[in-house]
Amino acid sequence: MKEALHLVHKYLRSSKRFPHIWCAGCGIGIFMQALIRVIDQSGYSKDDVVLISGIGCSGRLPVYVDFNTLHTTHGRALTFATGIKLAKPRLKVITVMGDGDAIAIGGNHLIHAARRNVEIASFVINNQVYGMTGGQCSPTTPYGLRTTSSPYGNLEPNFDICRVVEAAGAAFVARATVYHTRLLDQLIGKALDKKGFAMVEVISQCVVYSGRYLGLDSPVEMMMWQKDNSIPVAKASKLSEAELKGKIVTGVLVDREKPSYHEEYEKLPRKKSKV
Amino acid sequence: MRKITRKQVLLQGNEACVKGALMAGCRFYAGYPITPATEIMEIMAKELPEAGGVFIQMEDEIASLGAVIGASLTGVKSMTATSGPGFSLMQEHIGFACMAEVPCVIVDVMRAGPSTGLPTQPSQGDVMQARWGTHGDHPIIALAPSSVYECLELTVQAFNLSERYRTPLILLIDEVVAHMREGMVLPSGEDIEIEERPQPTVPPEWYIPYGDPGTGVPPMSAFGDGYRYHVTGLYHDIRGYPTVRKDEVEPLIQRLFSKISKDFDRLQWFDSFYTEDALITVIAYGCVARAALQAVREGRERGLKVGLIKLKLIWPFMRRTITKVLENSPKVLVPEMNIGQVSREVKRVNPGRCEVVTLNKVDGSLITPVEILKILEEIHP
């Protein structure tokens, strides 16, 4: 409690911003606390952190925290982040996106940011649904699920965000759930430290929509579902595709060394200053 | 005293635009290839690293303007360039830049549309898109050069106005001016006045990022300079935090307009030729203004009392200047390479006594001096 209060007083904006917009039982708050806890432990100066979001429930996160914060357009957080990182490389650039935000409308930006390997720590809070607009299916909604925009059941197979980002070339890819808070802290820390594009998929719950659709009626039930269906990556490597169907593989999925975009850029010829 | 050296050069319009941008202090470019704007990107790709700036080719035009706005938020003067199809994609972020008040310059080298249209025949079809392309009520400033030198001059001005008013600036170059080559004297740094965005003069804890300091333009701190604040495309209060309160929403949108409209008197950029006694005044811009000037000169040689107003500023529409023309000239001719976009504005501000004649061409070819002169002769009193 004392630790939480320290974080509240140090990192949350005191003026006019609360109560927050998230529903009771939403997982975004758990992620937000984990993020500021790790930033606090990592020793980054608040002046050097830029936190950028897109649109949706997750898009509202930056306004509550006392960094340089930027709430952009739907799906485009990574484009702004790219400009900020390249224009001022000393800044610690962090993006937070939702699943519809990152992989539907922002899918093109996500794969290209990963391919360029721009040094951005990005977090995709995946609640498998468009929550803010009223529970429509997203590219991560399970096949067959009935939602407000798939009243006869979702006809589309869902994306594995981590595989997409890995294939696109990211230096670091990991997955956690908001149930596994210690793991979440570790992965956030690794993503922040990575010299390259890092993406952590954070499986979260939308109690109001996806919970109701899945027949999980409370935040506790949803988080127990996360616990029961998660498999650490080391264990998952011994299982077959069939055994992993519907499971959440957690942990570090990819961690590789490759030059980041601005490291490559700095090798370009520059005119010597005349001064 | 340093010796000022001015170089005689042969430049293309797009090249001159890059020269102007670099002189104005642009050090970030993000873009996506598209004819007829690509030269701007190619030259930036070569020049910017050497100048200590950043160039990046993005995955599309939406991303390009997103990166430009991001870079500008760190305090770096930034720009992008595109043509009609890419300009359509950029509208989303032009609105963001208006709302969040982030200076940036967007060059639209106009080609004939709609859609993929006529790649890459010239056009002036994006005048109204520049004004109203992004959704919602918003102010906009757009400039249109008609010579290679003006490509340089107006690019510098675009950066200056963008920084001064904290607003996106649109440079509407038509394909002809962008690809034309002309000799010109390259101005040196001493010839050009460069403006910077207003900076906070108070310590961070006193900083009100979206307050009105009296000028309508709030001082802008760069990300990383110790003034932590929130930037959003939502309606926001003076601290930048989202709001739906009527007493905060209304003042914001009013300030966005008034910060520019209060300076309407300053923003009257045009050249006039032979207008004092003109019975017909031609109002033209871009490459058409060149043909119009030729037509007016030939008309004068034939004894016609004709003059020309060449617009450099397209938006906000120079109501005061144009109304004066309409009051003093019995007839006005507006030749344009579109279906009638500026002529619509001229008619809108017409007090009623003046006859507004239009000449519109939308087949991808130029309006020639002969075509303009023919009409001047036909309608001359």
Image (tube, coloured by chain):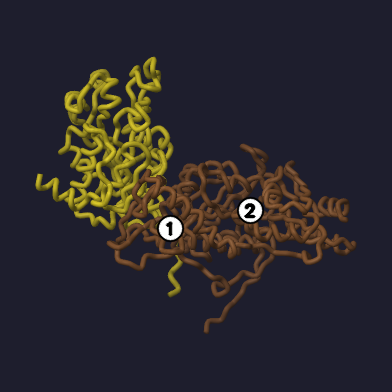
Chain colours: A yellow, B brown
Q: Position of residue A209 (x, y in %)?
A: 30, 25
Q: Which residue is mark 1?
A: A268
Q: Chain of mark 2?
A: B
Q: Is residue A189 visible?
A: yes
Quarter-of-image position of residue A162: top left
Identify which amino acid the numbered label 1 is placed on.
Leu
Q: Nearer the viewer, mark 1 or mark 2?
A: 2
Mark seen at residue B173: 2
At which x and y percent is residue B47? 51, 60
Q: Quadrant of residue B72?
A: bottom left
Residue situated furthest left in the rendering: A2
Quadrant of the snapshot with the C terminus of chain A: bottom left
Q: Secondary structure at mark 1?
A: loop
Looking at the image, which is closer to me, B345 or A267? B345
Spatial CA span between label 1 and label 2: 31 Å
| Chain of the residue under label 1 | A
Q: Residue at x 87, y 61 (%)?
A: B304
B96 lies above or below B150: above
